Each structure stands twice: as structure tokens, then as C-alpha cells.
Image: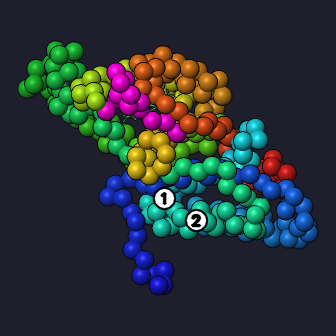
Amino acid sequence: MSATTISPLVPREGWHVMHLFYRVEHSQWSLFSDDEKRVAKTRLTELVQEIRATPDTHLLTFAIATPKADVGFMLLTPDLQVATAFEKQLTLSLGPEILSPVYSYLSQTERSEYTTSAEQYAEETLKAEKGLAEDSEEFAQGLKEFDERMAHYLKHRLYPVLPDWPAICFYPMSKRRTGENNWYALSYEERRKLMGSHARTGRAYSGRILQLITGSTGLDEYEWGVTLLAKDTIDIKNIVYEMRFDEVSARFAEFGDFFIGMQLPLDELFRRVCL
Ligand code: 76R
């Protein structure tokens, strides 16, 4: 089958997201001549350029702190066929068995189930909180501003463009499903209330933490991938700590492995991981 006959796997909305973590096999790399090393690095550099030039596609490159891994990529692109092709090429780009995968995670960008609807905003905020009458000018203005804010917000959740902030933290998580603490047995209203308090904690980090929550039920081990970008690792430490007290996390959160990386341009990344 030629590539052109393969049907794309593009979600009705949102993009596919892959978090890829590799170890550098220095024993293999040391067998390369200087020329072979240069050719290999050029191949990866050109591939990264090709990926970044693909429409609606983003690639973050980072070095991982600690020997959990050496190199990390975060790839966002609509079509899973394309994502997989890029992932295979990234893995092989420096030559066979130079980058060996140590962890990976597949998820999709998604809208939140708990986003405030225009009706809720009208009832809870404009009428109840602000005491505005439904036929007033202010009410109409408030609703218009809300719609604009939400359109912007939804665009970021589904089609994010991530900043080049230096610190990147990734971990997968699920909501607990045991006994009294079964998230999925709670009513929608209870979950919405709990998520409201979660979001309030999160909003206090506005400007310091940029979070992207991507859904992975049916796609990978956990239910979400959590990606946090920051300019200071203390903000990562503090937000994750503070959220542990939040009922949603305290009662319901289960976490996988944590990875901390530093976004770097490729030439610096090569130097950092001694390639
Ligand atoms: O979507 C939004 O940005 C607004 C409200 C919001 C939702 C719906 C929100 C805000 N989050 C939402 C959903 Mn979150 N978030 C996490 C973690 O370590 C831990 O304990 C939890 C990991 C962090 C650090 C974080 C940060 N959030 C979710 C979901 C999906 C749940 C579901 O659908 O059941 C998960 C798994 C999750 C986990 N969250 C925020 C933040 C921050 C910083 C915000 C504020 C964003 C802002 O308004 O600027």
C-alpha cells in the first residue's frame, strides 16, 4: 500500500500528543567516527526542522534531568499516522540503537468536561454573584466577554502552542476508582464542584505555570498526561505540592513516573547529552 492510500487518523477535534523519552547509548555512539557523528546529528536536526514545518505540528525538544532518561520530545500533531511516522524516524535518526526508548506516553488534547457553560456563567456569576438583570446592557456585555474568553481558552486546550519556558515537567495520572473514593461514581455536579476548587488552586499560578492536560483513557496506561511548563522549578514543586491538598488530588489522584526536563535548542541539547 502506498502512503497516499493510507487513511489519516485525525480526531474530530484536537490533536494527538506523544511524550517520548530516550536514553543515549554512548557505547554505540562512541563507535561512530567524527564524520558519522556529524552526519547523524545533521539527520536529526533536519528531521526536527521537517516536523516543525508540518502544518499544525509542534515539537518540543528537551534534556532530562537525572539518569531516568537523557533526551525528551513532546510531539503534537493531528494525524496519528503522521505522529507514529515521526516518532519512528526520531528514534532512528541518530542511527540504530543510539536513542533507546525508556518511556513514552500517548494522549490527545481535549476540551474539559467541567468548563463553565454560558448558561452557568449567566446564572451563577452574572445573575447570582453580580446581581445583573437579564435584559441589562451589562449582562449582554458580560456574556459577550465570556464567549470571547472561552473561545480563546478552548483554542488553547485543543490546539495549544506551548512557550519555550525552560522547565518542563511531565507525569501521567488517573482518578482513583476504589470504595468511597471512586471518582467515576460521583455525580457530575459533585465532580464539577471539586474541579472548580482544583482550578482555583491552579489559577493562582497563572503566568508562572502553563499546564496542558491531555486525555489518554483507552490510549495509554493512565487517564491523563500532565505537562507543566515553568520558568522556575520551584513553581512546579509548589503547584504539585499544593494540589496534593486539594480534595481532587488528595482523595482521587494516582500518579505515574515524573520526568523533569529543560527545553533546549538542538545544538545545545547535543552538547548537554554529550553527543
Ligand atoms: O481547564 C482549565 O484550565 C480550567 C479549569 C481546569 C480543569 C478543567 C484546570 C485548571 N484543570 C482542569 C482539569 Mn488541572 N491540573 C492537573 C494537575 O498533581 C496533581 O495533583 C494534578 C496535576 C495540575 C498540576 C494541574 C494544574 N487538571 C484537570 C484534569 C482533568 C480532570 C477531569 O477531567 O476529570 C486533570 C487530570 C488535571 C490535573 N489545572 C488548572 C492546573 C492549573 C495550573 C490550572 C489553572 C489554569 C488556568 O486557569 O490558568
Q: Which residue is mark 1?
A: 77
Residue 106 x/y as whole percent: 50, 52
Check whether the beta carbons of the residues at disc 1 and disc 2 lie within 8 A of each other: yes
- Identified at 34% across, 38% down, the residue is 112
- Ligand 1 within 8 Å, label 2 CB: no
Q: Main secondary structure of the magenta part?
A: strand
In the image, taking residue 138 as reference, residue 25 lies left or right, namely right
Q: Which residues are magenta?
A: 172-184
Q: Which residue is mark 2?
A: 86
Q: Amino acid at mark 2?
A: Phe
Q: Residues within 10 Å of mark 2 (few under 14, many from 20)?
A: some
Is residue 180 in sight in this rendering?
yes
Residue 128 location, quadrant: top left
Quadrant for the C terminus, please.
Answer: bottom right
In the image, taking residue 69 as reference, residue 52 lies left or right, namely left
Q: Residues within 10 Å of mark 1 (few under 14, many from 20)?
A: many
- Identified at 41% across, 30% down, the residue is 176
- Identified at 64% across, 32% down, the residue is 231
